[in-house]
Structures are given as structure tokens and as C-alpha cells.
């Protein structure tokens, strides 16, 4: 082949999205213009849809918003209360899934991973899990994932995810890392667009835990947000950035802190999301690197972009026979064209 000939066109990777709330819907829009990935499968709590030629994001979102489930799509939609299992039976040839599911209870994502292991499916899974204890449950599944032929990329959203990976990169200038401080600002127009995200954030507030936040009715969430003027202020969160950076050999988990502010009534970010990595160079100089996300980038952009970047990287590992569990601090995401 001469240098100016283009390489053989590769078939797009067939990808699925599990969970079709705020992040799942954004994921379908992120995928729509991509040539390297084709969105073929989706499941929500009440149904699923599968089309090996590709699903249409606008039609799926309209159906979900109007009728409550993609299972109502007139072509390719199936209503089911066992949507993940049924989709897996129906669509064995999906290369990888982004798990945009709520982790409520805190064991839910690990139970979904076990369901994939038991089904015999082989491929790549990516999550955007947030809690340390949730990622720990997946670390416990390392051997089973490996034996099942599944490459599982955990903690691959924004934080953990993009910011954890940035911290791993920034650490390279230092001989010793003293602190990693993640501060996030999230602005969303209304909390109903991201119910699981907001409930899981409330679970970090003093006096709340995951079970309590999960049990709250929508009216109780609204009453809480009325009292705080729509603002959630979060400090010293149990965030898996700590265990991911520790596992990657960068810094012990007690030196990693995560906190932020979520405004549930205004899409403008209340503060600029950033990660600051402080350390000592080999010459003995103390310094900090700061990586700040652009204020115009939404939570959805900063979660779904990395999730698919890690899905592409995971598929490359899978094709080389490398299975088991990896986190965003261990692998570089690849850019999806
Ligand atoms: P959401 O509440 O808007 O949507 C959840 C979706 O999952 C819904 O479509 C629902 O029908 C579906 N679902 C629930 N149970 C299901 C089941 N058993 N089978 C199939 N589908 C099911 O959720 P969201 O706000 O988009 O958040 C999704 C997850 O992403 C949360 O866990 C959140 O914490 C996480 N998140 C991570 C980051 C990060 O940076 N790492 C940022 C934001 C959100």
C-alpha cells in the first residue's frame, strides 16, 4: 500500500448503553456523529432496544421521555422488567457497554458485572462509578472478570475518571506526591434530568447515607433542595479517585480529597472543576500542577467523552487478550473519531 492510500475501512465497534437517564441519553448524542462506534443497544429499567444497524438517538430519547421506556419504540423496542438479561440474550455481538446505571443500592453495579460474568458474554464494560466502596467491590471481581474474558474499565467518568487520569499524568513531574485535591462544580437546569446522580450526591451529605438517599421520595428530594436553594455543597466525599490513585502506586488514599458544589437549578457551573496535584521534585522543590476544565463543558460531556475513550482503549486491550479490571488511573483513554 502506498503512503497516500487510506488503510482498509474498519467496521465500527458495536456499543451499548445501559441506563437511559441523564447520562445514558447524553451518551447516545455523543455517539451519534462518531464513525468508529455504532450505538446498537440500550436498556432502561422497563425495556430495551436493539438494532444491529444502529439506533437513532432522537427517536429513543423522545420515546423514553414521552412513554417512560425505550421498550416502547415501535421498531426494535421490547418491554421487559429483566431488560439487561434479555438484551444480553438478544444481542450477543455487542463489543462493549457503557454502564450509565444508578449505583443504588451501593452493590448494584457489582451485581450487574456478575450478571455479565454469568451470562458467558465476552467484551468490554465501562462504568462511571463514584464511591470508593463501590469500586472496591469490582476489584474483588478481578479474577472472575479475567476468567470470563471481560475487560472492565472502572471509574471512567469525570471524577473519578478524567480528573483521576489527569492527576496520574501530573504526578510524573514529582519524586513524591503530597496531595491530590479535586474540586468540582456542576450546574444542571433541573435535578430530574439526573435523578441518580443527585440522590448519590445527597448520600454524601452529613446525616445521609446511600440507603437513606435511595429511600427518599422525589418530593423529599425537592424539599431538601428547596431548603438549600438548589445547592448541594459536598466535602471530604468517599470518592474512588483515592483508591484508584493508590492502586496505581501514585499516592496513598488518605492524601486524596474530593469535594464540590452542585447547583441543581442553573446549568452554569458554580465553580471551575479542577484537580491540583502537589508534590516535591527530585531537586527538592515543592510545587503544584492544576488542571482545570473549561466552564462551558457540561458534566455530561466530561463523563461520556472519557467513558467512550476508555471503552475504545478497553476494546484494544480485549483484542490483545488482556482481560480483568482496570481503572482510569492505569490506562490512557483513546480518542473516538
Ligand atoms: P438517571 O437516574 O438519570 O438514569 C438512570 C437510568 O437507569 C434510567 O434510565 C433507569 O431507567 C435506568 N435503570 C435503573 N435501574 C435499572 C435496571 N435495573 N436495569 C436497567 N436500567 C435501569 O441516572 P444518571 O443521573 O444519568 O446517573 C447514572 C450514574 O452515573 C449514577 O450512578 C451517577 O452517580 C453516575 N455519575 C458519575 C459521574 C462521574 O463523574 N463519575 C458523574 C455523574 C454521574
Image (cartoon, rainbow, N blue to C red):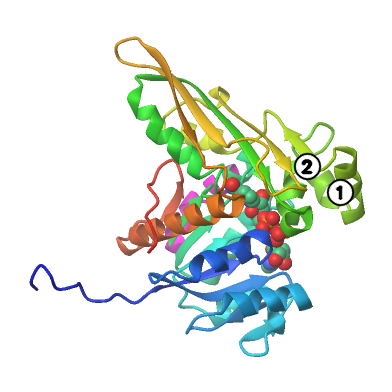
- According to the image, label 1 marks what residue? 221
Task: Residue at 55% x, 54% y: name it.
Answer: 301
Quadrant containing the C terminus in the rendered view: bottom left
Residue at the spot of label 2: 202
| Position of residue 285 in the picture relative to residue 53 (left or right) | left
Q: Please provide the residue range marked out in magenta.
A: 136-149
Quadrant location of the N terminus? Answer: bottom left
Magenta part, dominant SS:
helix
Q: From the viewer's side, name the closer residue of 289 and 209.
A: 289
Q: Is residue 115 above or below residue 256?
A: below
Q: Does residue 110 show up magenta in the picture?
A: no
7 lies above or below 77:
above
Which residue is rendered at x = 59% and y = 50% of the image? Answer: 298
The answer to which of 214 and 5 lies nearer the viewer is 5
Identify the element where label 1 is drawn. Answer: helix
Return the x and y of residue 132 as percentages of the image width and height: 61, 39
* Residue 279: image location, x then y, percent: 42, 18
Q: Position of residue 275 (x, y in %)?
A: 52, 32
Does residue 117 appear in the picture of this structure? no
Residue at disc 2, secondary structure: helix
Evaluate whether residue 199 shows in this view: yes
Answer left or right for 78 relative to 122: right
Verify CB contact (< 8 Å) between mark 2 and mark 1.
yes
Ligand 1 found in image quarter? bottom right
Q: Point out the residue furthest to the bottom here.
A: 75
Between 44 and 59, the one nearer to me in the picture: 59
Residue 215, image x, y percentages: 86, 51
Characterize the local packing of mark 1: few (<14), some (14-19) or many (20 or more) Cα atoms within 10 angstroms. some
Q: CA distance from mark 2 to mark 1?
A: 9 Å
Q: Quadrant of residue 311?
A: bottom left
Residue at position x 29%, y 11% in the image: 283
Amino acid at each position: 500500500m502506498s503512503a497516500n492510500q487510506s488503510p482498509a475501512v474498519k467496521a465500527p465497534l458495536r456499543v451499548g448503553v445501559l441506563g437511559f437517564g441523564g447520562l445514558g441519553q447524553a451518551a447516545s448524542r455523543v455517539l451519534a456523529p462518531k464513525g468508529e462506534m455504532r450505538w446498537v443497544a440500550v436498556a432502561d429499567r422497563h425495556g430495551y432496544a436493539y438494532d444491529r444497524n444502529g439506533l437513532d438517538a432522537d427517536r429513543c430519547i423522545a420515546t423514553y421521555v414521552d412513554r417512560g421506556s425505550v421498550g416502547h419504540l415501535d421498531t426494535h423496542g421490547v418491554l421487559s422488567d429483566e431488560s439487561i438479561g434479555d438484551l444480553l440474550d438478544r444481542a450477543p455481538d455487542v463489543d462493549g457497554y457503557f454502564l450509565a446505571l444508578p449505583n443504588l443500592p451501593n452493590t448494584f453495579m457489582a451485581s450487574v458485572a456478575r450478571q455479565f460474568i454469568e451470562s458467558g458474554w465476552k467484551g468490554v464494560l465501562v462504568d462511571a462509578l463514584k464511591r470508593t466502596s463501590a469500586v472496591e467491590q469490582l476489584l474483588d471481581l478481578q479474577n472472575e472478570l479475567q476468567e470470563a474474558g471481560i475487560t472492565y474499565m472502572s471509574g471512567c467518568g469525570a471524577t473519578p475518571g478524567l480528573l483521576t487520569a489527569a492527576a496520574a499524568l501530573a504526578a510524573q513531574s514529582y519524586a513524591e506526591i503530597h496531595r491530590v485535591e479535586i474540586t468540582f462544580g456542576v450546574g444542571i437546569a433541573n435535578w430530574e434530568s439526573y435523578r441518580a446522580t443527585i440522590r448519590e450526591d445527597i448520600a454524601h451529605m452529613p446525616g445521609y447515607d446511600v440507603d437513606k438517599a435511595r429511600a427518599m421520595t422525589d418530593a423529599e428530594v425537592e424539599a431538601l433542595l428547596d431548603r438549600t436553594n438548589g445547592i448541594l455543597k459536598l466535602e471530604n466525599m468517599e470518592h474512588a479517585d483515592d483508591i484508584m490513585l493508590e492502586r496505581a502506586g501514585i499516592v496513598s488514599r488518605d492524601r486524596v480529597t474530593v469535594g464540590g458544589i452542585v447547583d441543581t437549578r442553573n446549568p452554569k457551573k458554580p465553580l471551575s472543576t479542577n484537580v491540583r496535584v502537589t508534590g516535591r521534585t527530585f531537586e527538592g522543590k515543592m510545587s503544584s500542577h492544576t488542571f482545570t476544565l473549561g466552564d462551558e463543558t457540561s458534566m455530561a460531556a466530561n463523563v461520556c467523552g472519557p467513558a467512550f475513550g476508555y471503552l475504545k482503549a478497553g476494546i484494544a486491550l480485549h483484542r490483545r487478550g488482556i482481560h480483568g479490571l482496570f481503572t482510569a488511573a492505569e490506562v490512557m483513554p483513546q480518542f473516538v473519531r
